[in-house]
Image (cartoon, rainbow, N blue to C red):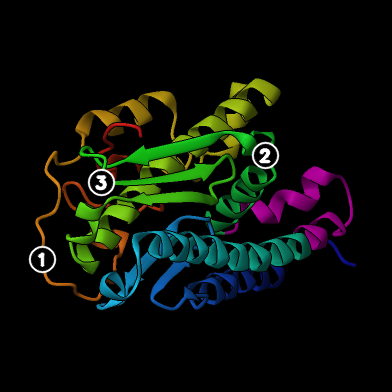
C-alpha cells in the first residue's frame, strides 16, 4: 500500500470519519425509553414516552433506562471500534516509520482523537469501579462503571411525579456528571502510566470530555439547582446537551469553558 501522504488519502480518511459520526447519530436503542450516543461515547439524546411513567413500575422503568443506555452505547462502540481499527491499519501500513505513517492522521478532524480516547477508556482496568451520582433530594440516582456504561438506576416515587421530560433531563444530568468523573479517572491512569506530557497530547483535542483536575473542580463548584423538578404532566422528552442551561446536561464535545454544574455524589 502506498504511503498515506496525499491530499486525496487524507480527504478519504476524513470522509470516512464523517460517515462514522453520521452512522453513530442514527443509532438508537429503546422503546419507552430511548437513548442515542455520539461517536465519542457521550450521551447525545435521551427520551421517555409520555405514558411510560404510568404504565411501568419504578423497578421496571429503572431496568428500561439502564437497558436503553447500555444497548445504544454498545452499538455505537461497535461501529466506532470497527472503523477505528480499519483507519489505524491503513495508516500503519502506509509505509515508512510509524511517525511518517501517522502524519496524515494528525491532520484529520479532532473527532479521531475522541474515538481513540474513548476506545482506550472502554478497555480500561478501572471498569470494576462504580461512579454513582444522585439528585440532591435522593429521588433519582444513576451509576456508571469505569468504562462509562450504565450499571443501575434508582427511582423513588417522587421522581415519577416529575413527568417524563423532567425525569429524562435529570437522568441526562446524572449521566454527564458521572461520565466526567469516569473520564477524569481514565486521564489520571494514563498520566500515571505514560506521563503527564504524553497524556496532555493524547487528550488535547478533547479537553472537556477528558477534564483535568482543575476543570473538574470548576465544573463541580458551579453546582446544579438545589430544587427538584415540580410535578408536571408527562411530556415526551427529547433531551439534548445542545440546549444545556443551569442545572441541565452539557455538551462534552465543546471546550471545557462551556461546562455546566455538578452536584453531590450519590
Give the main secondary structure of the magenta stretch.
helix
Q: Is residue 10 magenta?
A: no
Q: In the rendered image, which residue does mark 1 sit on?
A: 232
Seen in the image, is 68 located left or right of residue 55? right
Mark-to-mark CA distance, 3 and 1:
16 Å
Viewer-proximal residue among 261 and 160? 160
Of the numbered discs 1 and 2, the one sitting upstream in the chain is: 2
Q: In the rendered image, which residue does mark 3 sit on?
A: 139
**Under tag 2, what secondary structure?**
loop
Any part of residue 98 in sight: yes
How crowded is the residue under tag 1: few (<14 C-alpha within 10 Å), some, or many (20+)? few
* Quadrant showing the C terminus: top left
**14 to 219, vertically: above or below:** below
Residue 259 position within the rendered picture, expressed as x and y whole percent measured from the top left: 29, 43
Foreground tag (1 vs 2): 1
Any part of residue 37 in sight: no
**Start-end of magenta stretch:** 88-108
Q: In the rendered image, which residue does mark 2 sit on?
A: 124
- Image-quadrant location for residue 60: bottom left
- Image-quadrant location for residue 82: bottom right
Amino acid at each position: 500500500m502506498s504511503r498515506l501522504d496525499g491530499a486525496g488519502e487524507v480527504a478519504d480518511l476524513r470522509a470516512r470519519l464523517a460517515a462514522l459520526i453520521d452512522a453513530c447519530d442514527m443509532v438508537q436503542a429503546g422503546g419507552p425509553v430511548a437513548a442515542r450516543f455520539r461517536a465519542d461515547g457521550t450521551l447525545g439524546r435521551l427520551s421517555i414516552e409520555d405514558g411510560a411513567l404510568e404504565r411501568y413500575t419504578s423497578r421496571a422503568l429503572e431496568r428500561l433506562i439502564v437497558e436503553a443506555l447500555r444497548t445504544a452505547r454498545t452499538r455505537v462502540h461497535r461501529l466506532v471500534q470497527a472503523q477505528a481499527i480499519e483507519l489505524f491499519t491503513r495508516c500503519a501500513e502506509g509505509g515508512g516509520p510509524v511517525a511518517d505513517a501517522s502524519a496524515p492522521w494528525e491532520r484529520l478532524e479532532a473527532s479521531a482523537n475522541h474515538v481513540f480516547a474513548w476506545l482506550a477508556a472502554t478497555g480500561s482496568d478501572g471498569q470494576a469501579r462504580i461512579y454513582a451520582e444522585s439528585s440532591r433530594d435522593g429521588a433519582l440516582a444513576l451509576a456508571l462503571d469505569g468504562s462509562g456504561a450504565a450499571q443501575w438506576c434508582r427511582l423513588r416515587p417522587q421522581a415519577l411525579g416529575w413527568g417524563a421530560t423532567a425525569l429524562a433531563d435529570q437522568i441526562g444530568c446524572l449521566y454527564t456528571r458521572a461520565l466526567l468523573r469516569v473520564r477524569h479517572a481514565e486521564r489520571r491512569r494514563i498520566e500515571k502510566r505514560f506521563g503527564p506530557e504524553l497524556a496532555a497530547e493524547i487528550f488535547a483535542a478533547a479537553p472537556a470530555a477528558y477534564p483535568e483536575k482543575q476543570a473538574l473542580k470548576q465544573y463541580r463548584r458551579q453546582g446544579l439547582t438545589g430544587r427538584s423538578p415540580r410535578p408536571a404532566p408527562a411530556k415526551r422528552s427529547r433531551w439534548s446537551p445542545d440546549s444545556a442551561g443551569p442545572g441541565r446536561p452539557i455538551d462534552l464535545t465543546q471546550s471545557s469553558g462551556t461546562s455546566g454544574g455538578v452536584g453531590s455524589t450519590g
